[in-house]
Amino acid sequence: MTDSQAAAPTALDPRPALASAIVDTLVHRIGKDAQAARPHDWLAATILTLRNEIIERWMESTKAAHAAGAKRVYYLSLEFLIGRLLRDALSNLRHNDEVAAALASLGVDLAAIEEIEPDAALGNGGLGRLAACFMESLASLDLPAYGYGIRYVNGMFRQRLDDGWQVELPENWLAHGNPWEFERRESAYFVGFGGEVTATTSGQVHWSPIEAVEAVAVDTPMVGWRGKRVNTLRLWNARAFDPIKLDRFNAGDFEGALAGQMRAETLTRVLYPNDSTPAGQELRLRQEYFFSSASIQDIVRRHLQYFGDIRTLPEKAAIQLNDTHPAVAVAELMRLLTDFHELSFDEAWEITRATFGYTNHTLLPEALESWPLPLFERLLPRHMQIVYAINARLLREASKVDGIDGNAIAAISLIDEGGERRVRMANLAFAGSHSVNGVAALHTELMKKTVFADLHRLYPDRINNKTNGITPRRWLQQCNPGLTGLLVEAIGEDFKDDAARLTALAPFANDSSFRERFAMVKRSNKVTLSTYIKDSMGLTLDPDAIFDVQIKRIHEYKRQLLGIVEAVALYDQIRSHPERNWTPRVKLFAGKAASSYHTAKLVIKLANDVAKRINADPAVGDLLKVAFVPNYNVSLAEKIIPAADLSEQISTAGMEASGTGNMKFALNGALTIGTLDGANIEIKDHVGDDNIFIFGLTADEVAEKRASGYRGRQVIEGSRELAQAVNAIASGVFSPDDPDRYKGLMDGLYEHDWFMLAADFDAYAAAQREVDAKFGDTAAWGRSAVINVANMGWFSSDRTIGEYAKQIWGVM
Ligand code: 26V
């Protein structure tokens, strides 16, 4: 297949062949004819047809890496938030127009079948989506890499709103089968749990687990830009060894016969839908060990098959730990090296540290993983011994360093001894890696100063920064074809191969006719989104209003509440001064709350209550509309981001490690209103102070204020606008059916305000009025929007992966 335009079929045109290939697949693989086929059948037939080419490139990629004896990158992540794959694969292979035309000739609309592909939602939020962007960039940069994770049967829950309250519904992405995946029954590993460890007199250690499951590989191809390379995402499925215990079955004990199977399958049944606090549940630790063990066994097996000598592992394999979820892999590799390959502890430790790198994604103390020691020891007795041995060595080293006192030793230890003893996964990951990185410049500096201060003193060269990025294929080319087309007209195709070339757009910021076309693209995207919102929610939006968007997980530190309180204040202002020249505004919110996170769920309800009241008030009309769009996921983000004018990135400074949504918006020509937090700081540095709205406390100021005993009351009582909004919410103006619903939430702002909402409110409101003024100046706004696009190329995940490849993995 070649890159072709949608022209009329001719004798030389390959399209009839493609159309008949799709029909052939439909008949012979799906078992339907064109008359009986339903949209899902066409989707499967299209994917299966396209897959043939992908498989060929996939095999070539694997063979080439083998022939070159190349070092491979292994990305271990409990989450891969991939979204849909058909448009991604079509676009990266440059077959969009051709396949659209072939399907059209069969009376099938490509866009419509793309829309019914389920999202692969095997992740919670930023960390999982980053893993997916990284997989795409690794293939695009032609680096041999494997992603390793879990093939959850049920991904991130679907969100429904019942009278404004979040309701979680099970997600079932595999309901129609998954044409992208290949089960590899030959790649299966034994993963044990529990039992005992014995040692022979000669020192041979033997672990006899009391329970075991089989990990079976399921592979999905990851297609890089222009199909240059196709890498593997290998997800593990758990199976019982003896699927049906026939003796029990024959004896009539059907339930007993299936119990082992059920227990094994439970392991890979569901993604933990929480990214704020560790579940602390045994099943989660089992998931972590299950996928870490299978992945390490697979990596070691491949290394020995290709290179023969376990000692050369660090020269041929780089393993990156995506947060601490796979940290037990450090102990697992140590176990294989010492117990099976009979290396000395010291040699094994050297190999392990040279092989692993660890990426930290949050400093929130409540999100740092640690496991009660008795649980860890019961489930993984051999790993517990190894953790003790690593710890003894670590603390011995630490005690030799000047300035490391008893408190520092306690902080460095792999075991938390304050209260019930716990195994600290971040310390294990840090100790077991040669590189520990943060995901934005500020975050990396804070790592050195806060959670890892003592480990940093011990190993001052280990912490480094790798500012996150996003793939411009999915987040510009695929989701925003209108803007992409305009960019090609202006600066040619080069930016598609190297996002840094977007800088060629900068001069067009001063070209009024270009700005007009740029504004037309944005308006057209806003019309498309408005149609979606009208159809799904029944709400009519004015596409000429400013589309102000805050979409992300609902979390107190991300401060959706600040956005809502400001909307209430604005509503009050519009009602009090209808004669003023207001800039019409649409405030869009979307995001999921962890099911046990009550405050986050209450914030969702508040957004909905506020929307209900404001949207029904004829006094504001089209000047202000508020909507909470249900079931935020990757595909919804792809619809909303191209239509945004204003990107809300308003976390409490010092708390958002990086953010990646911030990058997606700016790349699509939205202006950011944000705090000096995470990657916002670097976005500001790239787009320039005049093209971003920065407000609020800095991370240092937040820390000082907290230390000084700050309380929200101090500022609320001094800010009329804020006090009115908070008191209106607290007194039930937006919840007449339950006037006290938000009293506790608002009291929290008076009494604590840990997230500095009140402290930042006036600055935020002032920045919003600057936004209004600038949006009214079409030329000024358009200039800034174009400058944003021109300067966002640096935030391509190709740049990020290039840095990992050169500075951590040694593969470029
Ligand atoms: C954390 C936890 C903690 C408890 C156990 C379950 C669980 C599952 C996931 C997570 C991930 C939280 C960390 C996270 O997603 N961090 C986000 O990472 C993004 C990519 O680096 C970054 O842009 C966001 O700022 C950061 O919040």
Image (spheres, rainbow, N blue to C red):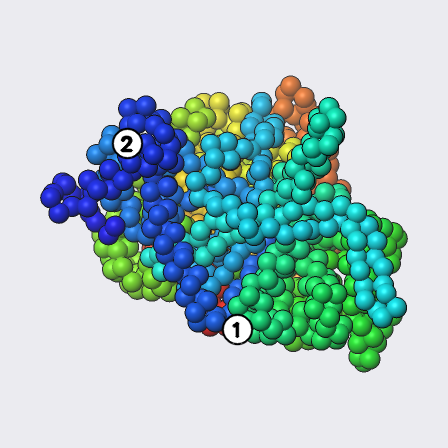
Element assignment for label 2: loop
Q: What element carries label 1?
A: loop
Which image quadrant is residue 609 in?
top right
Q: Above or below — where is 64 with respect to 713?
A: below
Q: Nearer the viewer, residue 70 or 485?
A: 70
Task: Categorize mark 1 by other alpha carbons within 10 Å: few (<14), some (14-19), many (20+).
Answer: some
Residue drawn at point x = 36 percent, y = 29 percent = 31
Outermost residue, top side: 737
- In depth, the one of 252 and 99 nearer the eye is 252
Which residue corresponds to the image point at 24% horizontal and 42% vertical from the top-left? 18
Residue 810 bears which disc, if any? 1
Q: Which residue was labeled with disc 2?
A: 108
Nearest the eye: 565 or 55 = 55
Q: What is the three-letter code of the residue carrying label 1?
A: Gly
Residue type at the position of mark 2: Val
Residue 89: percent from the left, percent from the top?
Answer: 37, 48
For the point 58% across and 22% down, which residue is it?
A: 163
Could you tell which of marks 1 and 2 lies nearer the N-terminus?
2
- Is 243 on the left-hand or right-hand side of 765? right
